[in-house]
Image (cartoon, rainbow, N blue to C red):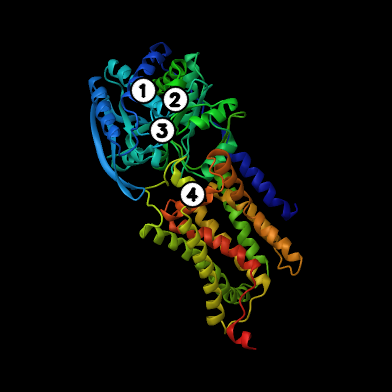
Amino acid sequence: MNIKLIPPFLIIFLLLVACSPAPEFQASYDPSTLRFDGAKAYNLEEKFVTTFPYRSSGQPNNRLATEWLQQELSSYGWACLIDEWSVINFSQEVPQRNVVCKLAGKSPKEIVVAAHHDISPAAVQGANNDGSGIAVMLHLAEIFAADGQPPYTLAFIATDGEEWGMLGSRRFVQTHPDINRIIAMISLDNMGMNYYNGMDIEAVGQFRKFGALWLQLLAGEAARLAGDLWVPQVRAPLDQLLGQAVPLSFMDQGPLVAAGVPALGFAGKVPQESAKLHWEIYHNPQDSLEYQSKDVLHQTGRITEALIRQLLAMDSFPSESGPYLYSASSRQVLRGAALWAIFIGWVSIFFLGSVFIGGRDFKQKLRSWRTVLPHFLGLWLPLAASILMLYLFVAIGLMDKYEIYPATTKDPETLNPHWPAVILFLLSLGMFLALGRWLVRRFAGNLPAPGFKAVKSFALFVVGLAGVYVLALNPFSLLFFVPLAFWFLINGRQGAGRLLDILFFLLGGLLVYALFYFFGFVIQHTNFAVLWYMMMMFSIGEVSFLTALAVTAIIAAGLSMLVKPPVAAQDLKT
């Protein structure tokens, strides 16, 4: 057998081994026990959002809303407390308040349900986001309290600060005595719009991980058993891929997923013809009772009740590990050795490229890399220094400080860049790059100018090292490395051919540009202000400094293949 055919056959074998049938569940609860009433939920929502408008975090009505929620849930027989703490947002201290209520079960293991009581500062009633989730949770609390002691403990949480990065659910995880006893968590958000035509499942973790597949499949089976409910579906593989590659959660399940708790977020599904209207209402004074539907609340509330009752009816629960991709059409799931082989194999491509380009003599390659290192550092360190400059801007008040995420969607802070900060950042970046080039000329005079093959070899090695970091942090983020394959085509061309090298360098960021467009222009409608939003993400540490170093190292590696190495100082005199 031709030895060259072994790797493809090995990959195919691993894929076949790793693709396995997804777990199947037979819902076992009694659907006749479902008692959720959409009209009752609507009345609760109406009372809540009209009594407590303008309840964004830190506002007087936010505090009054939590006090009312504590009283209401306590009246049903739940044991409630208010957890108070504070965060820094918009560079100011903002009080936060979670309402944490429990219905003790026969087992201390917990099923957690959360809805956020805070709203965007741009909203008034915040009926759908998230008065609807609060109303569903309140009605469910009344129903389950009337059932008597449940098999497992129920914990219902009205969270604060969801609009500013799921601060309340993050706090719940951080202060929980033992998250291992949490069986599952369900987040309720955006549950009542009159144009919803289904129930959506959100499974993205906050910065890492993805929601347990078994819980998502169980949600669908529990709804299907009822016979008259929308059936939640696991999102398409492409959505799963992007959700795991860019794990920025926007619902309260995020922090729990990141902590390893089986969790999902329930939200109504928006039909395509209503997408424009939905965006106009979202985080806007239009988010009022006018668009809320008793029938939709009846659907979303009963689906949630069905999943809770199914969890209560189970004696044991599946366990999962590692990333995955699930196909609903084939009911197959890809996880395990083959998936990791793909991840590791993609990183290895850059290491292999670094080995074979410019010869295979390792000692000779190390000597050549020594001459490349100053050139690379002269580009990388200035880029890293520009990140430190953003931290300085926050420290001196030129940019605002936030706890986790910058401001909120549609907030003026995200749509109106602080131009002094932008201009100073660009000037600083230019100055740092010029200084880096000068320092290389000044202090690397005893080293010969590196050849292009040595530069390219070293650049691919740096990308490979960054890939190892990403592999350890979040393997699905290696999706961003796919377009970097274009960098193999950069060839140190001169004259007009240099434009081709520049094109290949730019194509290496293809996926980044696509995501900028998707999130900035299509989803968030921030247009070019998305670049300002990125500056804020780095400035507050939402993107960690280690990750920033990896990102800037990749950029510097690509630039090192385009930028001519500085001529040593003595060579300039010659």
Q: Is tag 4's residue or tag 3's residue first in the polypeptide sequence? A: 3
Q: Is tag 3's residue or tag 1's residue first in the polypeptide sequence? A: 3
Q: Is tag 2's residue or tag 1's residue first in the polypeptide sequence? A: 1
The disc labelled 3 sits on which kind of residue? Ala
Quadrant holding the C terminus: bottom right
Q: Is tag 2's residue or tag 4's residue first in the polypeptide sequence? A: 2
- Left or right of 256 in this view: 445: right
Q: Is tag 4's residue or tag 1's residue first in the polypeptide sequence? A: 1
Q: CA distance from mark 2 to mark 4?
A: 28 Å
The disc labelled 4 sits on which kind of residue? Tyr
Whether tag 4 and tag 3 are in contact, CB under 8 A, the answer is no
Q: Which mark is residue 123?
A: 3
Whether tag 2 and tag 1 are in contact, CB under 8 A, the answer is yes
Q: CA distance from mark 3 to mark 1?
A: 18 Å
Q: Where is mark 2, residue-wise?
A: 191
The disc labelled 2 sits on which kind of residue? Met
Q: Report helix, strand or loop for mark 3.
A: loop
Q: Report helix, strand or loop for mark 2.
A: loop
- Left or right of 7 in this view: 297: left
Q: Where is mark 1, residue-wise?
A: 135
The disc labelled 1 sits on which kind of residue? Ala
